[in-house]
Image (cartoon, grey):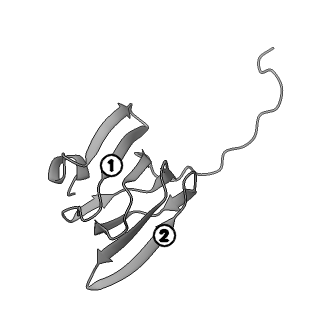
Amino acid sequence: MMDPVEVSPELYQTVFENDRVRVLKYRDKPGDSTRPHTHPDSVMVTLSSFRRRISAGGRSVEVELGEGDVRWVGAQEHSGENIGDTETVSIFVELKEPAPTPAAATLGPTGG
């Protein structure tokens, strides 16, 4: 795994971590780019509007998101470049556990 905090520490910062999630803050300026890195399944919350080019596996896509957008980001390896004219600021909530298997529901208090 290529941890974004380790490969691009000038852009990614861990702001919270426990045994179930890790929360990263990402901040860059126009023209900045990340080195290739991986993310597990994550939720991304944008704190600023931005335009980026995301590259993975020889393909590139341009992404434009608004301030306050919330997106599911499936596990992936990629690099990114700020191709807009604004700073990118985002929060990533990375999941550390696999998707849970459904359990039988328990309603109300338990016990005798």
**Which circle's residue, 1 or 2, is located before the other in the chain?**
1
Element carrying mark 2: strand
Where residue 45 appears, as percent x and y from the top left, is 51, 50
Using a 10 Å C-alpha cutoff, classify the residue at mark 2 as few (fewer than 14 neighbours), some (14 to 19) or many (20 or more). few
Could you tell me which quadrant the N terminus lies in? Answer: bottom left
The answer for how far apart the CA atoms under marks 1 and 2 are is: 15 Å
Observer-nearest residue: 40 or 27?
27
Mark number displayed over residue 27: 1
Q: Amino acid at mark 1?
A: Arg
Extreme-front residue of the structure: 85
Extreme-bottom residue of the structure: 58
In the rendered view, tell whether residue 72 sits above or below residue 52.
Answer: above
- In terms of image quadrants, where is residue 13? top left
Where residue 109 appears, as percent x and y from the top left, is 80, 20
Q: Amino acid at mark 2?
A: Glu
Observer-nearest residue: 22 or 47?
47
Where residue 36 appears, as percent x and y from the top left, is 21, 65
The residue at 20%/57% (across/down) is: 2
- In terms of image quadrants, where is residue 106? top right
Total numbered labels placed on residues in the image: 2
Q: Circle 2 sits on which residue?
A: 64
The residue at 34%/72% (across/down) is: 54
Could you tell me which quadrant the C terminus lies in? Answer: top right
Horizontal arrangement in the rendering, residue 37 relative to residue 67 (left or right): left
Mark number displayed over residue 37: none
In the rendered view, tell whether residue 62 sits above or below residue 13.
Answer: below
In the rendered view, tell whether residue 20 sits above or below residue 80.
Answer: above
Where residue 58 appears, as percent x and y from the top left, is 26, 85
Using a 10 Å C-alpha cutoff, classify the residue at mark 1 as few (fewer than 14 neighbours), some (14 to 19) or many (20 or more). some
Element carrying mark 1: strand
